Amino acid sequence: MQNVLFPGSFDPPTNGHLNIIQRASKLFDRIVIVIAANPEKQCLFSAHERHELISAMVAGLENVQVQIWEGLIVDFAAKIGSKIILRGVRALYDFEYEFELSVINRTLNPGVETVFLPTDQKYSVLRSSAIKEAALFGGDISRMVPANVEKALKAKIQGS
Ligand code: ADP
């Protein structure tokens, strides 16, 4: 049984994240999406809200689960006996950062490998931070995020 972790901030989850999850769900036995609950990082959505949003997005995918984790991802991997961390890569600038992160994670735990999946070109410029900014200024984000995320973003902006 090949358990693969897909960690990230997912603040909010986007169609780019969903595409990676859908493709990975066909490659591996089980995908565990790990929402990073980092108290140092300022997020628009709480870890619980991100969990709800992404759970609704993957409801149709039987081999995908969602968990919240506060701590090192390699520690979570060890806890559930997973040997693979999956990360999406949009472009070269992503690769530099992701490569460094993979080296750090392998230094922390040599038993855990990072696997990269290149983005589908349709989503190559989708970035949670840019989507939040577009939503803040009333831009049409309907092709960038699923409907539940669009609704939650609008509600969050109106409520702030
Ligand atoms: P983090 O703060 O850990 O980078 P993100 O939510 O920004 O969290 O990203 C989680 C993972 O999803 C990362 O591997 C990132 O490269 C990948 N990702 C984000 N947006 C896209 C996209 N549009 N296409 C493919 N992968 C993406």
Image (tube, helix red, strand yellow):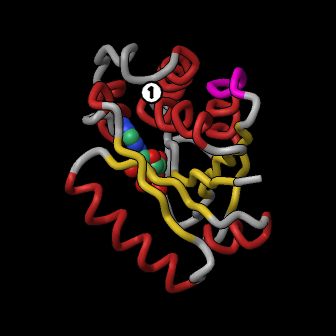
Q: Is residue 49 above or below residue 82?
A: above
- Mark 1 lies on a secondary structure that is helix
In the picture provided, is 128 more to the left or to the right than 65? left
Q: Position of residue 21 (x, y in %)?
A: 55, 36
Q: Position of residue 74 (x, y in %)?
A: 63, 72
Which residue range is magenta in the image? Answer: 56-61
In the picture provided, is 30 more to the left or to the right than 38? right
In the picture provided, is 118 more to the left or to the right than 150? left
**Pick the front one: 24 or 77:** 24
The answer to whether the beta carbon of the residue marked 1 is less than 8 Å from any atom of ligand 1 is yes
**Neighbour class for label 1 at 10 Å: few (<14), some, many (≥20)?**
many
In the picture provided, is 80 more to the left or to the right than 130? right
Q: Is residue 107 above or below residue 124?
A: below
- Reading the image, the residue beneath label 1 is 15
**Pick the front one: 7 or 138:** 7
Which residue appears at 69% of the width and 67% of the height? 77
Which residue appears at 44% of the width and 27% of the height? 15
Which residue appears at 30% of the width and 37% of the height? 130
The amino acid on which the numbered mark 1 sits, given as a three-letter code, is Asn
Q: Which residue is outermost to the left?
A: 92
Q: Position of residue 22 (x, y in %)?
A: 55, 30
Task: Count all numbered tags in the image, as a single digit.
Answer: 1
Q: Main secondary structure of the magenta part?
A: loop
Q: Does residue 23 show up magenta in the picture? A: no
Q: Position of residue 61 (x, y in %)?
A: 69, 27
Q: Does residue 60 show up magenta in the picture? A: yes
Q: Is residue 157 above or below residue 13?
A: above
Q: Residue 93: which quarter of the image?
A: bottom left
Which residue appears at 69% of the width and 32% of the height? 55
